[in-house]
Amino acid sequence: MEIMEFLRTRRTYRRFEQRPVAPEILTEAVDAARIASCGANRQTLKYIIVQSPETVAAVQPLVHWAASLPPELGRPKPGEQPVAFIAVLQDERLPGYSDTDTGLAMGSLTAAAWGHGVGSCLMGSIDRPALSKLLGLPEGVKLRYMVALGYPSHESHLVSMKDGDTKYYLDDARDYCVPKRPMEEVLLKTL
């Protein structure tokens, strides 16, 4: 697949087939995050793969979905939920944490997963205290994000933005429509 088509289809997915993702794919996604660029080569992020059905089920009520949509539309129903999660952690015992480093790592992680057809959803609206306890985080390691993963059971399309509205929505087929600003609005000039 050509790189721009890859990037256009590597969207956020919120409904998933109920088939497991191979452990090697999840480990490869973490490896992609591990080797991502980071400021001063600090490497302050750690990860936990959640793939056992029992732990995945325990995580489900502790994450929140699709703030732009009503819960009955944006939250996956039973039989549509992710089959794995990866916890993105900050090791505060290491100096130099950066949100930029976290973004680069999660971009690499989700791209590696999508290379195998595994969709993802980055989740920052999460119950950090409950998840930290569930995951058994050691002292000095802080939960930053959860990444939901699975094989998508819907499509996600880029669409033209209308009237400056950036909120995503569902079409009649319950596929996600993601408005993007046009290139002429974001590229101010070429010098």
Image (cartoon, helix red, strand yellow):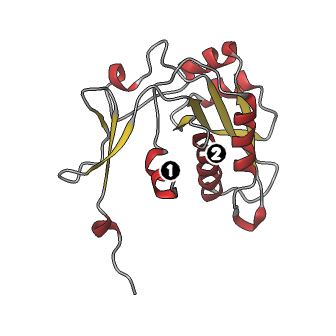
Q: Position of residue 20 (x, y in %)?
A: 64, 21
Tag 1, which secondary structure?
Answer: helix
| Other residues around mark 1 within 10 Å, as few (<14) / some (14–19) / many (≥20) | few
- The residue depicted at 36 percent of the width and 22 percent of the height is 71
In the image, residue 26 above or below residue 105 = above
Q: Nearer the viewer, mark 1 or mark 2?
A: 1
| Other residues around mark 2 within 10 Å, as few (<14) / some (14–19) / many (≥20) | many
Q: Position of residue 10 (x, y in %)?
A: 49, 45
Which of 120 and 1 lies nearest the eye of the viewer? 1
Q: Position of residue 158 (x, y in %)?
A: 34, 47
Residue 126's quadrant in the figure?
top right
- Taking the image as shown, residue 93 lies to the left or right of residue 45, namely right
**Tag 1: residue type?**
Phe
**Residue at mark 1 to residue at mark 2: CA–CA distance:** 11 Å
Number of marks in the image? 2
Tag 2, which secondary structure?
Answer: helix
Answer with mark 1 or mark 2, whichever residue precedes in sequence: 1
Q: Which residue is mark 2?
A: 112
- The residue depicted at 70 percent of the width and 35 percent of the height is 25
**Tag 2: residue type?**
Ala
Residue 66's quadrant in the figure?
top left
Residue projecting furthest to the bottom? 191
Q: Quadrant of the C terminus?
A: bottom left
- The residue depicted at 34 percent of the width and 19 percent of the height is 72
- The residue depicted at 77 percent of the width and 60 percent of the height is 42
- Taking the image as shown, residue 122 lies to the left or right of residue 109, namely left
